[in-house]
Each structure stands twice: as C-alpha cells, then as structure tokens.
Amino acid sequence: MPSKKYCLKMFLFAIMVFVPMYANAVAVDATDTVDDMDVATEMEAVSADAVAAYDASGSLFQQITDLEQEKVLMELEKERAQLNLELDRLAAEKIKLHMEIDELSGRAEQQQQELANAQARLEAEAAKLEREKEELEAQTEELIAKRAYATTSTATVTSDNATNQQAVNFNSQYRLLNVIGAGAQLQATIENLQTGQNRIISVGRVVDGYTVQSISLDEGVVFTNGSDTQTLNITKSK
C-alpha cells in the first residue's frame, strides 16, 4: 500500500498536468459548445490514460521519495541502535547493582559473624576473670586462715613457753651430781629430783626449754632461754 507522502506527491503531479490542460480547454470559443465538450472529453480521456500509463520509477520524483524513505529508515535504525545501547547499559547497571547488593549482604554477614566472635571472646575472658577472681578469693581466705592459725599457734607456743619458764626451777627440780672433763669438753651429770633419773649434759644441750650456756667447776651449770637465766651448782644442790 503506497504511503501518504507518495499519494500526496502523485496528487500534486496530477494537478500540474491537468490544470494547464483544463485552462486551455476553457479558452476555446463558447460558441462551439458541443465541439468543445467533445474535445474536453477526449482530453480528459487522454489525461486519464496518461496518468494511468505514467511510470514514476526512475524519475526524479521517485529518487526524492526513495531518498526520503532511506533517510527515515536511517533515523529509525539510529534510534533503534541507541535504544539497544540504553538497554545494554541498563542491563549492565542491573548486574552491577545485584553484585553490590550481594557484596553488602556478604559484608553484613561477615560483620555479624565478627561481632558474634568478639562477643564470645569477651564472654570467655569474663568467665576466665571470674574464675581467677574466685581462685584469688580462695587463696586469700586460705592465707587469712593460715595467718590466723599461725597467730594462734604462736600465741599458744608463747603461752606454753611462758608457762614452762614460770614452771621450771632448776634448783628445786634438779641436783648437780658432778662435773667431769677439762676445758671445752666439760660435762655435767644432773639428777631429776621428781623421777630420780640422771642425765649427762654438755654445752648447747636443751633441758626443759633451757639451753646449757656454760659448765664450770666453780659456777656449776648455767641454763638460759633468752629471757631467763638460772644456775645450778654443787654448793646449792641438795
């Protein structure tokens, strides 16, 4: 089916052909009406035949029409190519957007996992500190108990020593029997008046919490515990 532009050009061509012919027919003398009508009829028939037999292919009009159509087709191709480029760009941006969304999702999951790991480490560290605190408290309580026990034991020992110091009286409990030896090798024999048992002592020996400080023939035996000193000799022994 011919386009509207093609039909319009054909219409203009027909006007260019028929208008001069029609003007010439009107110029004929009016007196020959019948002849003129015949002539006009014949001219119209000739014009119709000419229009029907007219072949527009290869003419300038046809070339112009073809050029216009090609121009329109080129514009349409250009627009279609531009649309294809836009579609490709949109598809690439869509792919890029999906990749960014996936990356952000992966980062969010990674950050969430890191937070969970950090929280687990903090909880483990808190539990470790709590255990160390409990162990420290137990050690502190143990040290306090040991110190209290040591203080009590020291007080007991001190009390016992004080009791022994007050209870021991060598002149009433022992008797010096003899002193034998010479120089630093002197030894003394003492008798326990309550049990009747004899005991040989030398310098440095301990008797009832007292240490033998010295032994001599003149002074006898000297006992000391650091705070109290007693002497047991032959002249004072019973």
Image (cartoon, rainbow, N blue to C red):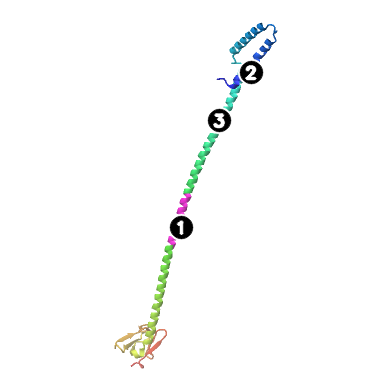
Residue type, numbered disc 1: Leu
Question: Is there any visible trace of residue 213 in the rendered image?
Answer: no
Labelled disc at residue 12: 2
Q: Is residue 32 left or right of residue 235?
A: right
Q: Position of residue 42 (x, y in %)?
A: 63, 8
On screen, residue 230 above or below 120: below
Q: Residue at x 59, y 13 (%)?
A: 52
Q: From the viewer's side, name the closer residue of 181 and 133.
A: 133
Q: Residues within 10 Å of mark 1 (few under 14, many from 20)?
A: few
Q: Residue at x 65, y 6 (%)?
A: 34
**Secondary structure mainly formed by the magenta segment:** helix
Labels 3 and 2: the sequence-earlier one: 2
Nearer the camera: disc 1 or disc 3: 3
Q: Is residue 112 left or right of residue 221?
A: right
On screen, residue 234 above or below 112: below
Residue type, numbered disc 3: Ala
Nearer the camera: disc 3 or disc 2: 2
The segment highlighted magenta reads: 110-129
Labelled disc at residue 6: none
Q: Position of residue 223 (x, y in %)?
A: 38, 86
Residue hosting label 3: 81
Place residue 35 in its image quadrant: top right
Labelled disc at residue 122: 1
Q: Position of residue 65 (x, y in %)?
A: 60, 20
Q: From the viewer's side, name the closer residue of 11 and 109.
A: 11
Residue type, numbered disc 2: Leu
Q: Residue at x 57, y 30 (%)?
A: 79
